[in-house]
Amino acid sequence: MDSIFLKEKTRVENQIIYVYWWNFGKKTIDYQGSYAGYLKKKDIKVRIRKTDGYRFTITTSSGKVVFDTVDCNYNHGLDEAIKIFFAMMGDKAELVTPYREYKMNWR
């Protein structure tokens, strides 16, 4: 089971994403590159769970969230982890992935 999750993890982490946030009302690109690079930049830790899925540890200056997924769809898990990160930050942001676009904190 681990080898399936590891292959999926490696494949997905190389996909390109774009992250935008609004600085004083102006759309600004925060990041353009692979999922792996963004995880490293924001210090989001990922590990494969023993039985199934992935565990994400998301840390900001104000708190820490541990998010477990029992789904083998790593794309979905990464997107959710990044959305949780933005919810913790509270900034208006947009995540553009190969499959979807998400807008966070749009009141």
Image: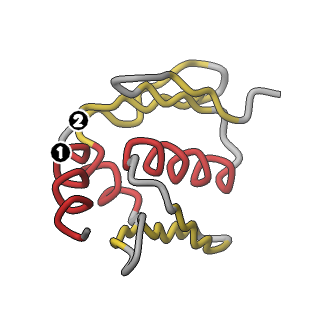
Q: Quadrant of residue 51?
A: bottom left
Residue at the (58%, 18%) spot, across then down: 26
Quadrant of res 44: bottom left
The disc at residue 11 is 1
- Please report contact status of discs 1 and 2: CB closer than 8 Å, yes or no: yes
Q: Which is nearer the eye, 36 or 2?
A: 2
| Element under disc 2 | loop
- Within 10 Å of disc 2 (Cα), the crowding (few <14, some 14-19, many 20+) is some
Q: Residue type at mark 1? A: Arg
Vertical placement of 60 versus 24: above or below? below
Which structural element holds mark 1? helix
Q: Quadrant of the C terminus?
A: top right
Q: Residue at x 35, y 36 (%)?
A: 31
User: Residue 27: x percent and y percent?
Assistant: 53, 19
Mark 1 or mark 2: which is in front? 1
Q: Nearer the viewer, residue 23 or 85?
A: 85
Number of the label disc, if any, that sits on residue 31: none
* Percent position of residue 94, x then y: 54, 28
The quadrant of the image that shows the N terminus is bottom left
Residue 52 locus on image (x, y percent): 41, 69
Give the residue drawn at x 39%, y 53%.
Answer: 72
Q: Position of residue 46 (x, y in %)?
A: 37, 68
* Left or right of 91, for residue 3: left
Of all residues shown, which one is farthest toward the right? 107
Determine which residue is flagged by label 2. 15
Furthest-top residue in this view = 26
In the displayed structure, would residue 78 be above or below residue 68? above
Question: Disc 1 to disc 2, how far (Cα)?
Answer: 7 Å
